[in-house]
Amino acid sequence: MTRLFNNPAAFADEALEGFAAAHRRLVRRVPGGVVRATATAPGQVAVVVGGGSGHYPAFSGLVGQGLAHGAAVGNVFASPSAQQVHQVARAAQSGGGVLLAFGNYAGDVLHFGQAAERLTAEGVPCATLAVTDDVSSAAVGESEKRRGVAGDLAVFKTAAAAAEAGLPLAEVVRLTRLANARTRSFGIAFSGCTLPGADAPLFTVPAGRMAVGLGIHGEPGLAERPVPSADEAAELLVTTLLHELPEGVESPRGQRAGVILNGLGSVKYEELFVVYRQVARLLAEAGVETVDPEVGELVTSFDMAGVSLTLFWLTDELEPLWTAPAEAPAYRKGTVAPVAAAEPSTTGEAPEAADPDPVENTAVPEASEPSRAAARTVLAALGAIEATVRAHADELGRIDAVAGDGDHGIGMRRGSEAAHA
């Protein structure tokens, strides 16, 4: 469970503040999230990723040279707003257009899409891509409905490396779509996570059982099974993913694949290595050559006890992008060329409006007694809302957890407190 927090509604903001303070050489805080602290070449495509908090190192930990140019960070398990995405994209872009990449969740699809429309209207070329790697969340013929889980890393890495190579936006988008189409993930869990301030996990798994195929927010999985040995878990993960090969891969034999064995929060590295030992054996027996495997926590869910496996089926185009150097707070590969620190004035902040805001320049008349009375009534109503939400935040989260991610209590508390303030 999450033990160290202040106000649960402020948890995401305070975590981001501390993260940025700890990694000032690599990232810089901007409204809505973080961007690279290092300079980006003029005209380079900016890759902006994002999603809810609670999944570190996704998404802020993946900002840096060779990886994302910026990350829009929402509240716990909640999508960043369209305004947040827009602000981060404006701060990250350097004249080559923007690719917005995110997991395939309703809020993210809506808000990143709205931000893309706004950027395009402002003259900033923009494209979006929703990652859809989770094989358990929809059938083969409905892959566009699948969730984005740990395969985010493979897709984000491809996009960023293509951008770093100086490719134009259309080519970055093409390669990123190809990477997404060739990425598959599958996961298991033994217990749910507990959100900051909550007194119970989002979901529970009976003792001695595991949930198969559930989502990173606790979305329902496919089934429950007895807890396996490490080797049995590896066999389930590998067999499931080898059963569904991407288009163009007739057989795993002779293929090359990037591999990600991901811990979801409280399955520790030694356990992951025990599982990966068997994953590597099984893939080798199937004729798959692994390329730069990653074993660790890449996309988490607070303290969820679980593990997922991702296979990124490489091509001659994709492999150099997967193996390209990168340096971000939570991900390093190879050696990146040193670059100067970014100048805040060159980060592409939104320009001043051509005409002054008429609202800001409208004189506010002196309040009348009826208007003061109305204001007191509004304030009292907002105070009552805040108090009611605070008293029932856990129940709002519990109800929400039945359907998915359990963040509704935190979100309502955050909003009601801000409105009252």
Image (tube, grey):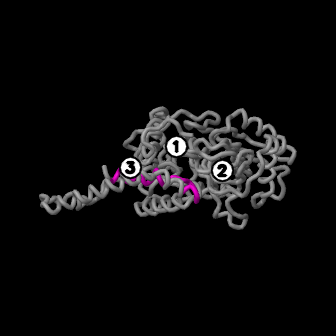
Q: Position of residue 390 (x, y in %)?
A: 41, 50
Q: CA distance from mark 1 to mark 3?
A: 19 Å
Left or right: residue 259 compared with residue 116? right
| Nearest to the observer: residue 234 or residue 391 | 391
- Residue type beneath disc 3: Glu
For the magenta stretch, what is the residue range?
400-419
Between the residue at mark 2 and the residue at mark 3, the CA separation in whole angstroms equals 30 Å
The one of 296 and 383 positioned closer to us in this rendering: 383
Which numbered disc covers residue 349? 3
| 144 with respect to 246 (left or right) | left
Q: Residue at x 84, y 44 (%)?
A: 282
State whether residue 319 appears in this view: no
Please tell me whether mark 2 or mark 3 is closer to you in this view.
2
Q: Residue 139, how many percent across, how many down?
A: 71, 64
Could you say where residue 264 lies in the image, as x and y percent from the top left?
A: 64, 43
What residue type is disc 2 on?
Gly
Query: Magenta span: helix, strand or loop, mainly?
Result: helix
**Residue, disc 1:** 60
Q: Position of residue 347 (x, y in %)?
A: 41, 45
Q: Quadrant of the N terminus?
A: top right
For the residue pair 12 and 6, the one nearer the viewer reads as 6
Q: Earlier in the sequence, mark 1 or mark 2?
A: 1
Label disc, if present, on residue 151 of the rendered structure: 2
